[in-house]
Amino acid sequence: MDRHAVHYRRHVIIPLASVGTRGYAASVFVTGPNGRRKAFGILGYFSSEEEAIEYATSCAKARIEGNRMPGLPRKLGAVRHWFLRHGMRRQQGLFAANPWE
């Protein structure tokens, strides 16, 4: 668990990546200079453990600095854009035919 621990501005950041059905869930513990520990819940889901650890660490650093947490990667948006660009549009409406059947 502590193999990814990062010391940053007198804080200790311990990022976690838990495997779930939606991928690797990123979460993080931050221990302040006074010893108080704060846990952040699931920050997002990622396709690899490394991505989840990296995102959790960057969120904790931003929070320590007083900045807004970074947005999630736009991978799904890029995939959607590719499908729309290549003419594979989804039909609208409740009773539209399912192209995947």
Image (cartoon, grey):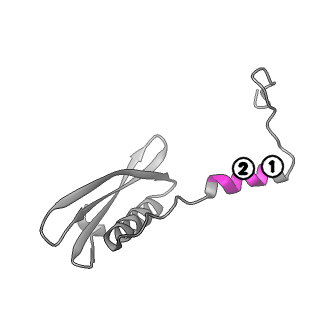
The residue sitting at 81% across, 49% down in the picture is 84
Report the amino acid beneath label 1.
Answer: Leu
Q: Residue furthest bottom?
A: 9
In terms of depth relative to the viewer, which is nearer, 27 or 4? Answer: 27
Tell me where the magenta segment starts and ends, as one range.
76-83
In terms of depth relative to the viewer, which is nearer, 97 or 43? Answer: 43
Q: Residue at label 2? A: 80
- Disc 2: CA contacts within 10 A as few (<14), some (14-19) or many (>=20): few
Q: Residue furthest left?
A: 34
Image: 92 above or below 19? above
Kind of element beneath mark 1: helix
Q: Residue furthest top?
A: 95
Kind of element beneath mark 2: helix
Residue 48: image location, x then y, percent? 48, 58
Q: Residue furthest right?
A: 87
Residue 43: image location, x then y, percent? 41, 53
The residue sitting at 70% across, 53% down in the picture is 79
Q: Residue at label 1? A: 84
Q: Tell me if 87 is positioned left or right of 95 in this view.
A: right
Tag 1–tag 2 contact (CB < 8 Å): yes
Report the amino acid beneath label 2.
Answer: Arg
Q: Tell me if 72 is positioned left or right of 65 in this view.
A: right
Q: Quadrant of the C terminus?
A: top right
- Figure label count: 2
Q: Is residue 57 magenta?
A: no
Q: Please give the label number shown on residue 5.
A: none
The residue sitting at 48% across, 48% down in the picture is 23
Image: 68 above or below 89? below
